[in-house]
Image (cartoon, grey):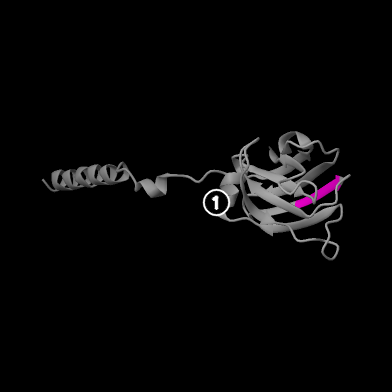
Amino acid sequence: MKLSVIFRTSCICLIAFFWIACEKGDEESVKSKAPLHDYWISARLNNKDAGTTSTATGILKGSYSESSKEFSYAITFDSVTAQTVELCKGARGVNGSRVIKFSPNDGELYKSPLKGKFTATALQQRDLVKGLWYILLTSKEYKAGEIRGQITLKQKQ
């Protein structure tokens, strides 16, 4: 009889243990976060997307880290006296809105190469990764933009 009580108690404890162990966890604890990536960024600036007849050209090279949200850049350009250098939000071929106006690096002038870094917001990061950013250089001759280049990302290995 004593053995029967111990056996029943053991069975009940085992059933309870497996019942609790098999319960679904809170969905928040089950979800995993997407991995964070680092990217090489680049853009070729020319008159094509800007819709001008300018012979100016430029290149943006840099990197972006999703974990630190740091955007590092070096923009080189020639055959243009830039009045502004801006990072804008917009799809290829679509005029967008300014995200950042870069500061001049030679007094009040922009001199090639233009280098720097900044920390992006979560919304800016989303737009960048979606391919919605471009670089725009304006001049006295082309106030709406002389050359432009859509930013592309390549994941670092």
Which of 89 and 122 lies nearest the eye of the viewer? Answer: 89
* Left or right for 84, reference 88: right
**Which structural element holds mark 1?**
helix
Q: Which residues are magenta?
A: 73-77
Residue 71 in the image: state x and y as whole percent: 69, 53
Give the residue number, with chain letter if any, for mark 1: 123
Which of 69 and 136 lies nearest the eye of the viewer? Answer: 136
Q: Residue at x 89, y 44 (%)?
A: 79
Residue 3 vs 102, above or below: the answer is above
* Left or right for 133, reference 60: left
In this view, the residue farthest toward the left is 1
Q: Is residue 126 magenta?
A: no
Quadrant of the rendered structure where residue 49 is? top right
Q: Residue at x 43, y 44 (%)?
A: 31
Residue 76 in the image: state x and y as whole percent: 84, 47
Residue 83 in the image: state x and y as whole percent: 79, 55
Q: Quadrant of the C terminus?
A: top right
Q: Residue at x 21, y 42 (%)?
A: 11
Q: Quadrant of the N terminus?
A: top left
* Left or right for 32, reference 72: left
